Amino acid sequence: MYQLRCIECGREWSDEHYTCECGGLLEVRLNLDEIDVDFRLDGKNITVWKYRSLLPVKIDPVTLREGGTPLYRAERLEKEVGVRRVYVKHEGLNPSGSFKDRGMTVGVTKAIELGKRAVACASTGNTSASMAMYAAKAGLNAYVLLPAGKVALGKVAQALMHGAKVIGIKGNFDDALRIVREVCEKEGLYLLNSVNPFRPEGQKTIAYEVADEIGVPDRVVLPVGNAGNISAIYKGFRELYEIGMIDKMPKMTGIQAEGAAPIYRAFKEGKDYIEPFENPETIATAIRIGNPVNARKALRAIYNTDGLAEIVSDSEIIEAQKFLAAKEGIGVEPASASSVAGLRKLAANGMIDPDETIVCVVTGNLLKDPETVVRVCGEPTEVDASVKSVIEKIRS
């Protein structure tokens, strides 16, 4: 059905490998000619596992009914940016509140298939929350490494409540990932960061769902941190194209925060490799990553589709977060809003064709990071417990 193949040298590996000896990332290559695709793009019964025939697992899935997230028409955003049609794919309405559930349902199912008893990850928050939930559902032990003091409390609470052992390290995400990879090797844990080639297989179903509901948009805009999502969505569209279910590819457009933008910098310089940011910093904690492991895949996705990369400031991210909530009723965490901030910036700079149909992927729920909301919006107003006081405050 598939092979695990290095994207650099082409060497094939077994299911329990994450990277090649040459240092290249592994990718699941489906034998599309041999697969009996048993679904239609008819807009019905949309979930991750509707597309099981294109997912590389052999056993019944560990599932919490992920996927099937809303694709909202954003008419006020359309007017704001001057684009004919804009949709927002709200991944924050997955079970754990982020797109990570798509990868975890496949990754944890693969862990069971391989006979693993424990899983582990490094995380800026959402990966840990999702992994903890699916590990709990599967009856696996879960271990999480976080950069201490750098992860939104809502995400830490999810991991703790679902039974993961959470360890904070005095370093950043890149340090945590380096350490957890070595720990997994020494302790026999199954690594569930996006360097695991089966994680993106679940995330690619975002592409399937978009095509299922509205066809292929002209452009997909999304936040980029560790870069697993942009490369996964590109892979999903590419597979649909190769089996003849769609007849074009969307332009993949990745948005990074100014303080953590190695992929943007590589794109502007025309490179297919990155130079890491040593000390990444941004209010958008979910994409505060200086050395994304999927950078090569992400740059390939952008270049191969004539896409774009852009950066946005923290203030632009918060403005977009507020706009999306106040004007479209869609509440997302800061990192998620970077896709909308990026679209606004690209449109203002004349980089977007007004006739395009665009899908902005927003990746995490507003409640993932309530501390930032209170910090930028302020505390609730307090008055005396009387009708007169309330009316005075309303009228003021």
Image (spheres, rainbow, N blue to C red):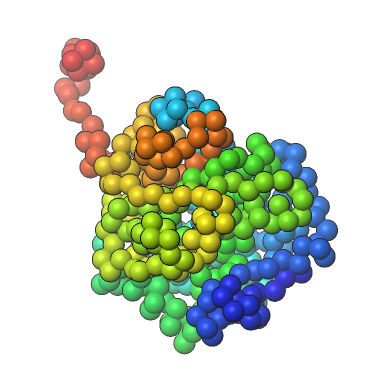
Q: Position of residue 306 (x, y in %)?
A: 54, 51
Which quadrant is home to the C terminus? Answer: top left
* Picture quadrant where residue 161 is located: bottom left
* Residue at the spot 58% in from the left edge and 40% down from the top edge: 218
In the rendered structure, the answer to whether residue 74 lies left or right of residue 215 reads left
Q: Position of residue 26 (x, y in %)?
A: 58, 73
* Picture quadrant where residue 261 is located: bottom left
In the rendered structure, the answer to whether residue 322 lies left or right of residue 270 reads left
Count of all numbered marks drawn on residues in the image: 0
* Residue at the spot 67% in from the left edge and 39% down from the top edge: 215
Seen as rendered, the residue at the extreme bottom is 186
* Picture quadrant where residue 267 is located: bottom left
Give whichever of 342, 15 is nearer the camera: 342
Give whichever of 167, 81 is nearer the camera: 81
Asked if one can make out residue 308 in the rendered structure from this viewpoint, the answer is yes
In the rendered structure, the answer to whether residue 221 lies left or right of residue 11 reads left
Give whichever of 279, 263 is nearer the camera: 263
* Residue at the spot 16% in from the left edge and 22% down from the top edge: 384
Asked if one can make out residue 153 in the rendered structure from this viewpoint, the answer is no
Q: In the rendered view, would you say 322 is above or below 160?
A: above
Q: Position of residue 270 (x, y in %)?
A: 43, 61
Q: Position of residue 43 (x, y in %)?
A: 71, 38
Which quadrant is home to the N terminus? Answer: bottom right
